[in-house]
Amino acid sequence: MPDALAYFRGKIVPLSDARVSVTTHALHYGTAVFEGIRGNWNEGHKKMYVFRMREHYERFIQGCRIMMLDIPYGVDELCQITIELLQSCGYREDLYIRPLAYKSEERVANLKLHELASDFTLIVVPFGAYIETDGAINCCTSSWRRIDDTIIPPRVKISGHYVNSILAKTEAVLAGFDEAIMLTQNGDVSEGTGENLFMVTNGVLYSPLVGDNNLTGITRDSAMTLARNELGLEVVERAIRRSELYLADEVFLTGTAAHVTPVGTLDSRDIGNGGIGPITREIRDMYLDAIRGDSEKYLNWCTEVPLE
Ligand code: PMP
């Protein structure tokens, strides 16, 4: 079993040594930004591929700018630290890679970002399926509205704003659903609690505008690219109303953790025939090949980690 390691305070240490004080600002206020990146083990190639690492770190740096988190690394250094940590751990299985920039100041009663010191840490853990299901999932419309850009910017992964997703996910699962779909303050469709959303109607692929309080999803971008380039589909970003989802031919969710997940029912109404639709299946299969380095054409989305 590989050692559990972390990058912490500038060096690679045992995960058990990567600890912070209870007075750490981010613990109290969620003043942190993180990323969720997958490392995918290809058993046939005996290789580890990290999916779209640069794009994840570009979004991470955007989040740091919004939250005034000064960390001494750019995208290149963050990619390099990630590769070093993966090499030191030596995992040969699917992984979740979690960088975190946080307000590390051990000072609680201060709400001024510009006065607070920042730090960076990186952990990596083995990670299989996020949503345990063989088929399409059952979703509900959340009673929690998606936070608005005027409240906490949802386009990047700010730790504090995940309270919104967590309230919605918890409500959905306790009510017997797999996932929640959140609406904007206007009642337009926004996204899942950890996934972007797509709808297929009459052969056209639709997704809500990023401005409708979505995360700028990297899986979303990958699905759009595959749909346009490989299936020749028209892809339209526009506001979507809740009832359009009920009447759609297919609905699916995308995310680093969830991959491409078909939605079978929404609010106890079947979407299409209630199973995985044909376009969802094609996009899902192409995506799963791409993330594992099995797609020649999209190999540039993968960073191979040289392991001993
Ligand atoms: N929306 C939210 C709220 C998320 O947490 C995630 C997961 N990062 C996504 C969408 C999907 O983004 P990505 O495809 O970049 O993982």
Image (cartoon, rainbow, N blue to C red):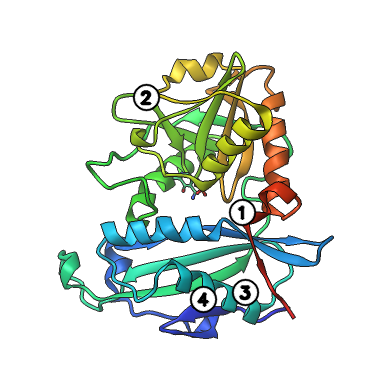
- Which dot, 2 or 4, sits closer to the camera? 4
Q: Residue furthest right?
A: 44
**Marks 3/2: CA distance?**
40 Å
Residue type for callout 4: Ile
Residue named by callout 1: 301
Q: Is mark 3 within 8 Å of ligand 1?
A: no
Of labels 3 and 2, earlier in sequence is 3
- Residue 54: x percent and y percent? 50, 60
Few, some or many C-alpha atoms within 10 Å of disc 1 (few <14, some 14-19, many ≥20)? Answer: many
The local secondary structure at tag 1 comes to helix
Mark number, residue 188: 2
- Residue 85: x percent and y percent? 58, 77
Q: Are marks 3 and 2 in contact (CB under 8 Å)?
A: no
- Compared across the picture, whether 150 is left or right of 154 comes to left
Of labels 2 and 4, earlier in sequence is 4
The local secondary structure at tag 3 comes to helix
Relative vertical location of residue 209 with respect to residue 16 in this rendering, above or below: above
Mark number, residue 81: 4
Residue type for callout 3: Leu
**Marks 1/2: CA distance?**
32 Å
Few, some or many C-alpha atoms within 10 Å of disc 4 (few <14, some 14-19, many ≥20)? Answer: some
Residue named by callout 3: 86
Return the residue nearer the eye: 131 or 75: 75
Few, some or many C-alpha atoms within 10 Å of disc 2 (few <14, some 14-19, many ≥20)? Answer: many
- Residue 202: x percent and y percent? 60, 13
Of labels 1 and 4, earlier in sequence is 4
Residue at image x 55%, y 31%? Answer: 139
- Which dot, 1 or 2, sits closer to the camera? 1
